[in-house]
Image (spheres, rainbow, N blue to C red):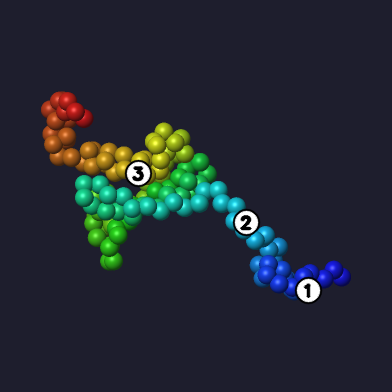
């Protein structure tokens, strides 16, 4: 049986790793997991939201979760309950500069779609010049 040197970075002989995996070398970081969750704060129209993006939530679809930053949750721009879930393909997210940009554009498009002024213009068959 080969004996290991005792000291910094070395295990005593016969010691087994707790996780069942061999220990990683000092200074090495574990490999990043594909599809790791990205969390960020998004502010639109002076209202903050917490957003979690999971790129591989369901195959080629990513999941965006919009939450209220308050405890208990309060209304946010895209939800009366303080929570909204949205699924997007990886291609849709790649077309934006980043997941943060996609989330911001998504919230703005939801607000535009709900705008009462826009609904009136569409009912008359007249759209706004600036969109």
At mark 3, the secondary structure is helix
For marks 2 and 3, give the CA distance.
33 Å
Image quadrant assignment for residue 114: top left
Any mark on residue 122, and which? none
Task: Using residue 53 as the reference point, say whether residue 45 is left or right of it.
Answer: left
Q: Residues within 10 Å of mark 2 (few under 14, many from 20)?
A: few
Precedes in sequence: disc 1 or disc 2: 1
Residue 46 locus on image (x, y percent): 21, 50
At mark 2, the secondary structure is loop
The answer to which of 6 and 53 lies nearer the viewer is 6
Circle 3 sits on which residue?
103
CB contact under 8 Å: marks 1 and 2: no
Any mark on residue 14, and which? 1
Circle 2 sits on which residue?
28
Precedes in sequence: disc 2 or disc 3: 2
Residue 30 in the image: above or below residue 14? above
Q: Residues within 10 Å of mark 3 (few under 14, many from 20)?
A: many
Residue 115 in the image: above or below residue 72? above
């Amino acid at each position: 049986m080969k004996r290991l040197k005792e000291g910094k970075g070395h295990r005593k002989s016969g010691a087994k790793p707790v996780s069942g995996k061999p220990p990683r070398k000092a200074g090495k970081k574990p490999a990043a997991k594909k599809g790791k969750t990205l969390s960020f704060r998004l502010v639109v129209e002076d209202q903050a939201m917490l957003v979690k993006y999971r790129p591989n939530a369901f195959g080629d679809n990513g999941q965006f979760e919009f939450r209220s930053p308050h405890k208990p949750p309060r209304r946010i721009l895209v939800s009366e309950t303080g929570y909204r879930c949205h699924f997007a393909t990886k291609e849709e997210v790649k077309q934006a500069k980043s997941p943060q940009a996609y989330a911001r554009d998504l919230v703005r498009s939801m607000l535009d779609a709900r705008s009462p002024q826009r609904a009136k213009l569409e009912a008359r068959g007249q759209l706004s010049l600036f969109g």
